[in-house]
Image (cartoon, rainbow, N blue to C red):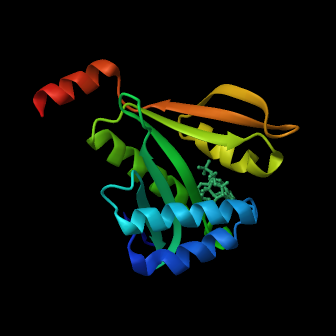
């Protein structure tokens, strides 16, 4: 079993859209937004504000992660979307994607990674996944997405502010 992580290209779009359509956690309206974000990235990867990595399992695209710097913050990054094909989950692809995204963020002196997610039970597996990877739930907005569906904000510190200043100084 060989996992490979690399930046997304145009040729990956169909496979990623298929992964998203096969992911029961995502509603059709969310797929529309996910596709807009992918198109924005493919249109201009450098200026879109999005970074997208794909995860391949034995050379077949099996998942992706989308992240980007949070506007108007000092080195905070949002992890916007991630998904692994349901039949390929539990084999380490999600972990490899998240680790690569965090490494990319650290390389450009990113300090914090933020994930916003829903409190409903469908996302429980994803929440546990993130908590196992060092994220902590730091805020909850009750009834944000819908009555009874709260927004949870998860946070992971990737660099201390001091480390960031030192890295900037060295660079
Ligand atoms: C969250 C998600 C990206 C994780 O991807 P993944 O490739 O399954 O991740 P990994 O294989 O690296 O780790 C999955 C963990 O769940 C466990 N697991 C076991 N069986 C599993 C299964 N059938 N499906 C998923 N995870 C399983 C694994 O053992 C692993 O736990 P561990 O790290 O303690 O060993 C994936 O579950 C997913 O796409 N979920 C639906 C979309 C979603 O909720 N996205 C996040 C919000 S945008």
Look at 66% across and 65% down and name the residue there. 31
Of 138 and 58, nearer the camera is 138
Instruction: From the top left corner, tell me how far across and down residue 60 is, in percent.
Output: 48, 79
Q: Name the residue furthest top.
A: 162
Q: Name the residue furthest left.
A: 170
Instruction: From the top left corner, tell me how far across and down residue 47 is, in percent.
Output: 32, 55
Look at the picture and state if 30 lies above or below 4.
above
Horizontal placement of 165 versus 19: left or right? left
Number of dots carrying numbers: 0
Horizontal placement of 96 versus 115: left or right? left
Look at 41% across and 31% down and name the residue there. 72
| Residue 58 visible at all | no
Quadrant in the rendering for residue 23: bottom right
Instruction: From the top left corner, tell me how far across and down residue 85 is, in percent.
Output: 62, 70
Look at 40% across and 44% down and name the residue there. 102
Q: Which quadrant of the picture is home to ligand 1?
A: bottom right
Look at the picture and state if 18 lies above or below 127.
below
Look at 68% across and 59% down and name the residue there. 30
Look at the picture and state if 30 lies above or below 168.
below
Horizontal placement of 125 versus 153: left or right? right
Q: What is the quadrant of the C terminus in the image? A: top left
Instruction: From the top left corner, tell me how far across and down residue 145 is, in percent.
Output: 77, 42
| Residue 34 visible at all | yes
Look at the picture and state if 23 lies above or below 115.
below
Quadrant in the rendering for residue 141: top right
């Amino acid at each position: 079993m060989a996992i490979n992580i690399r930046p997304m290209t145009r040729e990956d779009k169909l496979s990623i859209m298929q992964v998203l359509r096969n992911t029961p956690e995502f509603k059709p309206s969310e797929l529309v937004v996910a596709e807009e974000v992918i198109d924005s990235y493919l249109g201009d990867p450098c200026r879109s504000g999005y970074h997208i990595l794909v995860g391949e399992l034995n050379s077949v695209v099996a998942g992706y992660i989308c992240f980007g710097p949070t506007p108007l913050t000092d080195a905070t990054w949002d992890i916007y979307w991630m998904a692994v094909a349901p039949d390929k989950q539990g084999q380490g692809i999600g972990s490899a994607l998240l680790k690569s995204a965090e490494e990319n963020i650290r390389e450009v002196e990113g300090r914090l990674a933020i994930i916003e997610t829903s409190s409903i039970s469908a996302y429980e597996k994803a929440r546990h996944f993130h908590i196992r990877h060092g994220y902590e739930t730091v805020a909850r907005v009750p009834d944000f997405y819908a009555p009874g569906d709260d927004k949870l904000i998860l946070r992971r510190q990737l660099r201390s502010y001091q480390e960031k200043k030192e890295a900037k100084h060295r660079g």
